[in-house]
Amino acid sequence: MAYEQAAFDAVAIGASAGGVTALQTVVGALPARFPAAVFVVQHLDPRHKSLLADLLGRHARVAVKEAVNG
């Protein structure tokens, strides 16, 4: 499948803890060769470990990685 040049180099999506199902749906719909970086930001208490990358990775055809500080 041919892809046109992306209008944007990056896409940013924000959600709270209640938005995980919607994020799984959106990320799961992205083609393996999606032509832009996708940044997902989730509001999370800093005392809790995020499982978002693992949850999204189960539905994605693109690489999912958690950002690290530094």
Image (cartoon, helix red, strand yellow):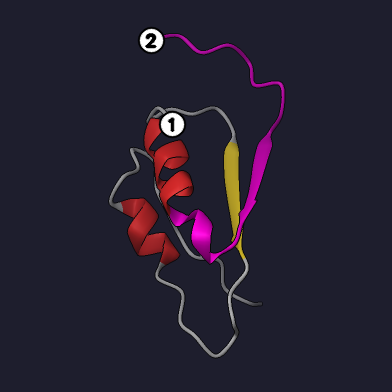
Q: Is residue 55 left or right of residue 23?
A: left
Q: What residue appears at the point 67 percent right and 38 percent down from the top-left corner?
A: 10
Q: Furthest residue to the front?
A: 18
Choose between 3 and 45: the one closer to the eye: 45
Q: Is label 1 in contact with label 2 (beta carbons under 8 Å)?
A: no
**Residue 7 x, y percent position in the rendering:** 71, 21
Residue at horizontal 28 percent and vertical 51 percent from the top: 58
Q: Earlier in the sequence, mark 1 or mark 2?
A: 2
| Image side of residue 51 versus residue 14, left or right | left
Q: Amino acid at mark 2?
A: Met
**Of circles 1 and 2, which is in front?**
1
At which x and y percent is residue 59? 31, 45
Q: Could you say where residue 43 lies in the image, as x and y percent from the top left?
A: 62, 68
Q: Residue furthest right?
A: 8
Q: Residue at x 46, y 74 (%)?
A: 50
Tell me the kind of residue under disc 1.
Leu
* Residue 9 lies in the magenta stretch: yes
The foreground one among 1 and 20 is 20
The residue where tag 2 is placed is 1
Q: Secondary structure at mark 2?
A: loop
Give the crowd class for mark 2: few <14, some 14-19, many >=20 residues within 10 Å: few
Looking at the image, the residue that sits furthest to the left is 58
* Picture residue at 49% right of the left edge, 85% below the top: 48
What's the magenta region? 1-20
Q: Indicate left or right for 63 with 5 as reference.
A: left
**Quadrant, the C terminus:** bottom right
Q: Which residue is mark 1?
A: 30
Q: Is residue 29 magenta?
A: no
> Please, is residue 43 above or below residue 28 in the view?
below
**Quadrant of the rendering where the N terminus is positioned:** top left
Question: Is 58 located above or below residue 67 in the figure?
Answer: above
SS assignment at label 1: loop
